[in-house]
Each structure stands twice: as C-alpha cells, then as structure tokens.
Amino acid sequence: MTAASTPWRFVTPIWPVLAVLVIGAALLSGPFLSPANIAAVLQQGVITGIVALGMTIVLIGGQFDLSTGATVMMAAVLALLLNPADGTSTVLAILLPVALGGVIGLVNGLAVYRAGANSIVATIGMQFLVIGAVLALVSGQHVRADNMSEMFVSLSRARFLGIPYSVYIFLGLVVALSIIMSNTVFGRHVYALGGDIEAARRAGVKVVRTGIATYMISGMLAALAGVLIASLVGNLDPTAIRGYEFPALTAVVLGGTSLTGGVGRPADTAAAIWVIAVITNVMTILNYQYPVQLLVQGVVLTAAVAFYSWQRARS
Amino acid sequence: MQITLSPMTLRLFVKPPLIPLLLLATFVDGFWSLGNLRTLAESISTDGLIVAGMTIVMIAGGFDLSVGAVMAMGGVAAVVLLPYGIVPAALGALVAGGISGFLSGTLVTRLRINPFIATLAMMVMVRGATLAYTDTRPVVGLDDTFLALGGGDPLPYAFLIMIVVMLAAHVLLYHRPWGRHAYAVGADERAAQMTGLKVNRLKIECYMLSGALAAFAGMLLAARLGTGSPIVGEMTPLTAAAAALIGGASLRGGEGSIMGALCGLLFVGCLINVMNLLGVPSYYQRMTIGGLLFALVVVEGLLQRARPR
C-alpha cells in the first residue's frame, strides 16, 4: 500500500533532472529561453505526453500497451477522413476516433485481463493489426482534409497567452489523472492491481473490469493525441506517423513508473516528457538527425530502467 | 467420443494446420511451380535462422524483440566489411550480432530487466545506430562472391544453411547437456540455479546465439537483395515469434522444439507466399501477421489459465 498512499510525495528523481537540464540548456544555447522556443518545447511534448499518460495508467496496473502508436495513427487518419468542415463533422471527427480508440483498448483489455495474454506481445500484435487495417483503408495514400473548420484547427493552433491550446489540454489531463489516480477508488484499485493482482482479487477488487478500464483510458488518450496531430497538420502521410509508443514508453519509465506495476504517477511522466522534449530540442538546435535521436532515446530508456532497478534493489 | 491423434499428426494437421494449408494452396495458380517454391525457400531461409535463435531464447524463458534490427545491422556490417574479403565480412556480422546479444543478455540477467523491455531498448539502439551509420540509405559494394551467396542451384544456399543450422540447433537442444540446461532454466529458473546451473551465463549465451544468427541472416538477405539496407526487418520479430509460438514454444519458457518451430515457420511462410500469389496488398499481410500473433497469445493465455497449477 505504500505506493497508493504516497502518490503526491513531491520530489522524485525526475524533477531535479528536469531542473538541471533546463538550466543547462539555457546556459548552452541562448535561444532556448526565448518565449517562442519555450512554447515549442511545451508543444513538442504534448502528443507523446498524452500517449504516455495513458501508458502510465496501464503500467501502474502492471501491464504494457504498445498498440498506442498505431491508435494515434488510426485516429489521425480517421479524423481527416471525416473531413471536419462544419460543426457536426468537427464533433464527429473528435468523438469517433476517440470512441474507436476506446474499442481498441477494450479488446486489448479483454485479451490481457480476461484471457491472460502476455500484454507486450498481444499489444504488438494489435499494433500491426491496426496499422495494417488503416493502411488498407486508405491504400497507403496520403489523406487530407480541405476547409477544416476554425474550431478543429484551433485545437492545436490557437494560443492563449502565447501557448497553444493543446498544451492546456495536456496539463488538464495531467491534473485530472493525478486526481483520479490518487483520490478515487478506481485509482487505488489500479495501484492494487499492479502491486499484487492476486491479493487485489482476494480483497474484492474487480480485477478484469478495472484492468479493461486502464486499457480503454490508454486507447482513448492515444486517439485524442492522433486527433490533435490531424488538427495540426491537416494533411498527412499515414506511414510517416508511427512509432509514438516508443518515446512514450521511454517517458513512462524515465518518470519512475515501475515495470512490474504498482508504482508511478502521471505528473512524473509529464516531467519525463519535458526532459525528453528539452533533450530533443537541444539536439535539434545542435542539428542531430532522427537516427541519433532514436539512439539517444534507447540509451536513455536503458539507463532509466537500470537506475530504477538498482534503486529498488538497494531499498 | 474421444479422438486421439499422434503428436506428428497433430503437428502437421492441427497445430499448425500445415497440410490443410498446403492442400488449399494447390488451388492457387502457380504455388507448386518450381519458381515459386524457390521464392518460398528463399523467403523462409533468412527468417528460419532467426526463428531458430528466437526458439532457443524462448525455451530458456526469454524473448528477443531486437532480431529485426540486428538483422539490418548484420547486413550493413557485412557489406561495409566486404572490401576486406568475404570471411571478415561474415565474421564481422557474426561478432556484431553476438555483441548485441551479449548486451541484451547482460541487461536481462545482471540488471534483472524484463526481457521484452531490454530487447525493445536494444532494438531501438541497434536500429538507431544502423540508421545513423548509413545515414538511412542502403549501403552498396557489390562483389561477385558475395552475390553468389544469394543464389544457389537448384536449392538456394541460404536454404541449405538454414537446414544445417536447424539440425545443429536440434542436436544442441535435444542431445547436448547445454540444451537440456536451457530447458531447465526456462522451466524453473530458481530450481535450475539451486542444482548448480550457471543460469546467467547460459541465458547470455542464448541471446548471443540469437543475435549472431539474426546478423548472419541479415548478411544472407543482403547477398540476395544485392544491398545492405538499414530499414529491413520491421516485421521480423513478429513473424519469428508467431512461428515459434505456433511451433509450441511458450512465452513462459521451458517449452518448444526446433521441429515445431520449423513447422511454424513453414506455415507462416506459406501463408505469406499464398497472399503474395493472390496479389493481396502488403497492408493485409501486416494485419494477418498482427492478428495471428494476437490470437496466438490469447489462446496461450487461455490454455495456461485452464491448466491446473
């Protein structure tokens, strides 16, 4: 129960790391602290961040969701295909992808919690199933939406105090999920699942229902991230948006969520997202390309896993 | 009425339904043509090396998601080292794969990281390094001896190599102490440790074997394609896992066999081949492999739940 009773314990190792990185980045490159760049860093983390929040909830419950990257792609393509030109179609273009994301989460949840499937392999299978289905739907072609409504575009483009709306959506989700995870019965049950699933079952937690709910949250959040991408670009090559699950997983693990479940906080995942966003931003300013960034992410993930497993072995 | 089937019948007709699939394939134009059988043999030979490695890792209770990235790295390494001769090229690929397997194994054993996550991280690092080194472009550097390796008449050399590797792996697993130890470690790691087996060392050796085989497969693929591409192998870990699972390996370790894996490999290979012949777009193939893997782990989960403990 220690995990569930301390979700608001404030300083976890990721926060000092974030502070040091921000100071370091500011000292290294002058333009880093310009308002435009700060807004860019905040926005850079939003899409991956929303995906990572959902994966955090699933992982606190002790399971993995690697189908999220495919769900992001599905939602982005579907939102554009629904062509959000007027009020009704805009609402549909937001709600339908999110609902379908929930359905994907439901199927994952049933497979993992009902049938007892290995969550990593099952959700990788789901990832390829969804990517294949989406590419088949659009025959691998670009999708574009003409005359997107003001409202749909404003989701990611409009700014309040110089910061895009999507950043506020992300912050709102962080706060909401933090409250849900630490102050509600559902949240405590998720921590219980990840702590010891057998004990949770004996204590009367509805294991299957709670577990399925974590996957549905993850699927819906990933879909929301996809809708935000659609609103930002309006025109996309489906094969180009993929692989979101990996940076998101890196952030989840970097934020200190235990790979065996029961430990973790949405706010720490957000801090880790900004750590990665700052690193990526500085690497982009210093002109390092995607492959090197991929390599660095792999190293960061390995180092984070090693650090936390060492820390837990010590205590 | 209880119907009992011999293990061999079960393997060929039901799990996987290999013979029914082959009979159905007869109705597909050109399946039994010599040209197509050669294509089939070529396509399963590189995957076959990887399936052998994956099966061994799974028997010892692990998993290797990095095989696709290591395959790409092996192909690139071989082509880059080709100017020094074909033997250094092959050795270079094997060593690169072995090192990556050693790192995976070390992450899994010494740092006690979940094998899926450890090899996922390894996959991303190897892929990133390969892409960075090649600047995301295929490397070329053709050499007649090397290209000849991609040919072979009447049977492709790669296919013969795959058969030899499968036989060696079978002997290793069934007739050498090392193989029996691998089963013991996968079935019950603590018990194996208590009987004095060097569990960590054995697991690292399994990952090194898988890495070296994947890199060697990458070299054979490069010889067939005439180029070392840094982007090949995205689907490979899925296909290999599906073949191994169909062949009786389990995600919990201690189960599986090379003969089973061979049947699984043939099944998946024929499935993809038939879809190619029917002109099914690659998206549907991706869907099929993904759906197959999803269904396999669901069935495995249900079976394990039903089994008394």
Image (cartoon, coloured by chain):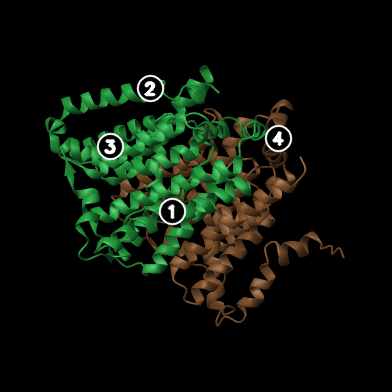
Chain colours: A green, B brown
Q: Residue furthest top?
A: A315
Quick check: marks 4 and 2 in contact, CB under 8 Å?
no
Determine which residue is flagged by label 3: A277
Determine which residue is flagged by label 1: A101
Please say whether residue B125 is visible from this viewpoint: no
SS of the residue under disc 2 = loop
The residue located at (49%, 63%) in the rendering is B287
- Which quadrant does the N terminus of chain A fall into? top right
For the residues labelled 1 and 4, the Cα–Cα distance comes to 38 Å
Q: Amino acid at mark 2?
A: Pro
Which circle marks residue B188 in the picture?
A: 4
SS of the residue under disc 1 = helix
The residue located at (13%, 35%) in the rendering is A35
How many residues crowd mark 4 within 10 Å: few (<14), some (14–19), many (20+)? some
Determine which residue is flagged by label 2: A13
SS of the residue under disc 3 = helix
| Mark found first going from the N terminus, 2 or 1 | 2
Choose between B49 and B189: the one closer to the eye. Answer: B189
Q: Amino acid at mark 3?
A: Ala
How many residues crowd mark 2 within 10 Å: few (<14), some (14–19), many (20+)? few
